[in-house]
Amino acid sequence: MLQRLRFCVGYFAWWMVYFAVIRALFLGYNHREAARIGIANVAGTFFHGARMDMSAAAIVSLLVFVLTAVSVLLPRRAGRVILWYSVVMIVVISLLAAIDVQLYGEWGFRIDGAILRYLNTPREMLASAGSSPVALLAILFAMLATLAVVSFLRLFGPGIRQWQVGRLPVNLASFTLLGGLTWFLYYPGKGGFQDMPMTQSTVYFSHDAFANQAAVNLAWNFLDSIWWQTYRRDNPYQYFPAAEATRIADSLLAGGSIPSVRLLRISRPNVMVIVWESFTAKVVERLGGVPGATPNIDTLSHQGVLFDHFYATGDRSPEGLTGVIAGYPAQPTTEIIQHPHKSVTLPGLPHDLAKAGYRSTFYYGGDPEFTNFKSFILQSGFDSLVSKNAFAPADRHSSWGADDHVVLGRALADIGRMPKPFFVTLFTLDSHEPFTVPMATVIPGTDERHRFLNAHAYTDRSIGEFIRQARTQSWWDSTLIIILADHGHRVPVLDSLQPSRKWQTFSIPMLWLGGALAVRDTVITTLGIQTDLPRTLLDQMGLDGSAYRWSRDLLAPGTKSWAWATFSDGFIWVNQAGGAVAWDNIGRQPIATLGTTGPADVRAGQAMLQALVADYLKR
C-alpha cells in the first residue's frame, strides 16, 4: 500500500516538474521577451503558474490514480495501462510544447484547440508552417519527449512492475485509501478550495501580456479551449446586463441607409471581390507601409476609391471570409465557420444578390475543405466553386495549390462567358506562408520579412496585370472590383513598439476600382472593418441590407466612425480621434493604448463583444 501511495505522490510531483520544464523552455525560446519583462516577472510566471500546473497535473493524474487503486486486484494489467498512457501523454504534450514555443511569436497567444481545425488538411497545415524553423522544432520535440519518457520510465517503471496482489484486508484498505486520494484530486483540479473552478485569469499577475501568457499551463489551456468550443453554452463576456450590452452595440451600429456619397454610376454593376491573403496595410506605401512592396496597388489607389482607415475583423482567414461575405464579426475563441449549423443562419451576399438577378462564382486555388471554407461558400449561396482540382498540376507551384496569376487568369477567361450581372469572389493564396512564388525575386532577402514582402510583390504584380487586361474587356465599364485582405499580418515589423500595438496587425486596405465607379482618386477616411462591406455595397446598389445586423454603411449619414476587432480572448478598439486600445479579457485590463482613449472606448468594445457572443451562442 505504501509503495502505491508513494507512486501516486511521486507521479503528481513528476508532472509538476515537467510542466515547469516546459515553461522554462517557452521562456528560453522566447528569450527576448523574457529578458524584456525582467527576472522578477520571469520568477512570477513559475510562482503564479504553479497553481495551473497543479490543475493540469491533477487532470493528467486522475486516470492513473484510479488505475493504481485497481492495481491492488489487477497489478500487471493496470501497470501496463499506466505506463502506456503516461508515455502517450508525455509525447502528446511534448509535441504541443514544441509547437507552442513558435506559435506564440506568430499568433500572440498560447496553443489552444484552434490548431485542430487544420488536421483534416495536413498538406495545408504543413504549408502554413513553412516559415517556421521546422527542423529546430522537431529537434526540440524529440529531445523533450525522449528525456521525459526516459526519466519517467526509470523513476516509475521498476516500481510498477513489482506491484503484487496482497491479502484481502490489505487490498480493501489500499483500494479505499487510494480511492480517497483520487477524490482529493478534485481540489487541485479546479485550482484550489474556492467555489468556482479556475480560469486563465487565475494565474494572471502582471500588466504585461507576455508574462501572463507564460504563466498559463499549455496543456490546461489546450483542454480548456476545446471544452469551451465544444460544450460551453454560457457567455463568458458578461460586462453589462444583457439589455444594456445590446443597446450599446445597436447604438454603435446605427446609421442611415441612404449613402451620402454615391460611388457608383450604375445601380446594378457586375461585382468582383478579390480577397488578398494577409494583405496588411504595412505593405502599401500610401498607407505608411514599406515603399515599393506593392507598386501596382499604390498606383491603382489613385484610380479608384481607397478606404484608408480600414481593419480586419479577426486574424484568421475563416474570420475574414465570414466578415466579407456575411458581415459577421470574428469571435475571440472560436470561428462560426467551423459550425455549419450556426453559419447557415448567417446572411450572405450571394443570396441577396441572387434576388437581384446575379449569378455567383467563388475562385480559390487551394483546397476548399481547408478550415471548412467549402460548407460556408455553398451555404452562402454561391452558384459554383472553382478550386484546386480545377487547375492542372503544372499550375500548382504553391504549397497551397494553384498560383495567384493562374487563378486570376482563369477568372478573367470565365468572366467573359458569364451571364451578366455576375458576382465573383476570388481568394488569393501565394502571400501565405511559406511565401514561395513563381517569380524571380524582386525583394531580395531570405528572412521571413523579405520573403513575405516578395510574395506580396508577386500578388501585386498578378493583380496589376489582371486589372490591365480587364480594362480591355467589354464588361469593364459596368463592373466594380473590390480588393481587400482576409486579415493583416504581424510581418513586416515597422517599429519596435508594433508587437504590442495589436491594431497595426489588423490594419488593412480596401480599394474599389472599375468602370462602374462614378468617382476617381477618392479617399474614404471613415473607420471601418470587413463586416461593413456587405451593407455599404448593398446600399450603394439600392438593395436591402437590413439582414446584416453587424454591418454598417460607411458612406451613410449618422454612421459612427470606429473600428473593432477580436483576437484570442481580447479585442482592439480604434476611435475617431485616432486613439486605440488593446484589451485583454482574461486579465480584464488594457495591454496597450495609443493616443486619446478612455473608459468609453473599453466600454464600447466590451458591449460589442458581449452582444456578439450572445448572438453566436443562440444561433
Image (tube, rainbow, N blue to C red):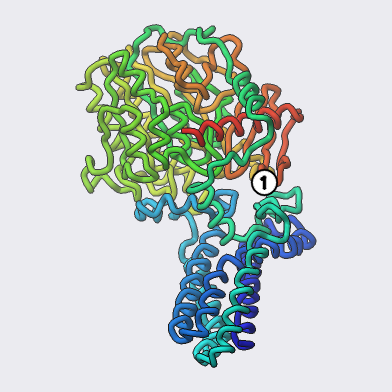
- The answer to whether residue 120 is above or below residue 556 is below
Residue name at image x 70 percent, y 32 percent: 602
Which quarter of the figure is the N terminus placed in?
bottom right
> Is residue 408 found left or right of 567 in the rendered image?
left
At mark 1, the secondary structure is: loop
**Residue found 32% across the figure and 39% down from its top:** 374
Q: Seen from this angle, which residue lies furthest front? A: 169
Above or below, 393 relative to 543: below
Question: Residue 489: horizontal and vertical position, in percent?
Answer: 53, 41
State the residue position of label 1: 586
Total marks shown come to 1
Which one is in front, 387 or 36? 387
From what the image shows, is residue 256 above or below residue 94?
Answer: above
Residue 89 percent coordinates (x, y)? 50, 70
* Residue occupying the point 39% across, 49% down: 436
Characterize the local packing of mark 1: few (<14), some (14-19) or many (20 or more) Cα atoms within 10 angstroms. Answer: some
Residue 284 can be seen, yes or no = no
74 is higher (above) or lower (below) than 490: below
* Residue 177 screen position, x and y as percent: 63, 79
Image position, residue 142 (x, y; %)? 49, 73
Residue 36 location, quadrant: bottom right
Residue at image coords 65%, 78%: 9
Horizontally, residue 33 falls left or right of residue 446, namely right
In which image quadrant can residue 152 be found?
Answer: bottom right
Q: Disc 1 marks which amino acid?
A: Ile
Is residue 600 visible to the viewer in this orientation of the structure? yes
